[in-house]
Amino acid sequence: MNSFKQGDEFKYRLSSFLSQEGKLLPLDRISFINSSVILIQTVEKEKFVLKRHQKKENVNLQWDFFDELDESNAVPFKRYPNGRKIISRNNYYWTITPFIQGEKLNYNLEADRLNAVKVLKEFHHKAKNIHISSATPEDYLFSRWYQRLLLFKKTASIFKECGFENLYKDIVQTTVIQLRLITEFPWESYELAAKKKGEWIHGDVASHNFLRSNQTHVIDFDLLKCTTQLYDYIQLGQRFLPYINWNLDKLLAYQMVQEKDVKAWVYAICIPSDVMREWLHYLYRKPTSGRHRYLSVMEEKWIKRSNFVKNSKLMLKSI
């Protein structure tokens, strides 16, 4: 199972592996969603999403969470026909999830943005009072964002080579200032309170992790964490911004968080962690091609993002 080429040879080897380890019926079809996720169909036309994982402890955490979660809009793992939760080979761990025919949400659509907020709140409502002993302490969110800033700084030469040195400096300066500003809020207390209450977040609220069929489901829990649910809404707010023209009033209208948390939420959204994340992902996928074009688009968006930060600071002063 260390080869991921498509074709009959791979299908037969995959089918044999799943049959031997999980007693799954022989496969009729396979379709790669990405290098780690495969849509499979058995000879009896049952469809599952087969996923490859690198860390067993992360899979165990998700299984423990799903076992404690009451019926919700989350799509959990499913046991193999022989009852096993996980099968493994070559230091990879494989799970199956029921296949749901549907379409991903599109944050360019107002209705889908409203739907995402509604569905996330429903998930959060269910993802409470779940205490799992195997859950390991996670790094403080803003510590991880600081580490992302350090990685971003290592790309300074690329900005300079492409003629976007001022853009680089502006992003770094804004990040440093905003990381300093959020220290006025007791984030560690928020996290501790959430852990005591057993509150969980999804961790990756990208539009492709919401699947609309007869209802809208939440999928892919690789970044599942026990922490303050504010973090999901910070990320969701950042993801909405490009689609609402970085308009603060429009963002506030979604009423993602309670009034008492608005100030902390907006301050955190102003940290351009998403800008740095997408840039680093881009370099990972395309390390040499199209950089000037990418940075030109980034600069256009950054002007709007900077105005959002300025407007946010004016608004926050009045709270």
Image (tube, rainbow, N blue to C red):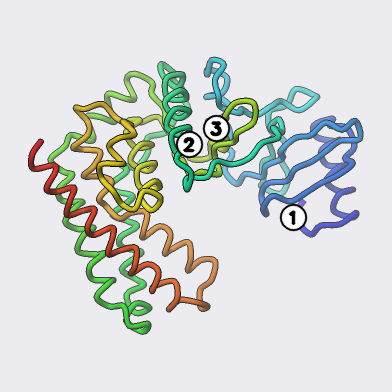
Of the image marks 1 and 3, the number of the one nearer the N terminus = 1
Residue 104 position, x and y percent, is: 59, 41
Furthest toward the left, the residue is 318
Q: What is the C-alpha distance between the residues marked 2 and 1?
A: 42 Å
User: Are the residues tagged 1 and 3 within 8 Å (C-beta)?
Assistant: no
Residue at which label 3 appears: 218
Residue 305 position, x and y percent, is: 28, 58
Residue 57 higher or lower than 155, as above or below = above
Q: Quadrant of residue 7?
A: bottom right
Of the image marks 2 and 1, the number of the one nearer the N terminus = 1
On the question of residue 134 being in view, the answer is yes
Residue at which label 2 appears: 111
Q: What is the three-letter code of the residue carrying label 1?
A: Asn
Q: Is residue 154 left or right of residue 3?
A: left
Q: Is residue 297 left or right of residue 85?
A: left
Residue at screen point 45% across, 76% down: 293
Q: What is the three-letter code of the residue carrying label 3?
A: Val
Q: What is the C-alpha distance between the residues marked 3 and 2?
A: 17 Å
Q: Quadrant of residue 277?
A: bottom left
Residue 300 position, x and y percent, is: 34, 68
Residue 135 position, x and y percent, is: 45, 29
Q: Nearer the viewer, residue 172 or 65?
A: 172
Crowd band around label 3 with a 10 angstrom C-alpha radius: few (<14), some (14–19), many (20+)? many
Residue at screen point 91% across, 35% down: 43
Q: What is the C-alpha distance between the residues marked 1 and 3?
A: 29 Å
Q: What is the three-letter code of the residue carrying label 2?
A: Ala
User: Are the residues tagged 3 and 2 within 8 Å (C-beta)?
Assistant: no
Residue at which label 1 appears: 2
Q: What secondary structure is marked by label 2?
A: helix
Q: Quadrant of residue 301?
A: bottom left
Q: Is residue 181 left or right of residue 257?
A: left
Q: What secondary structure is marked by label 3?
A: strand
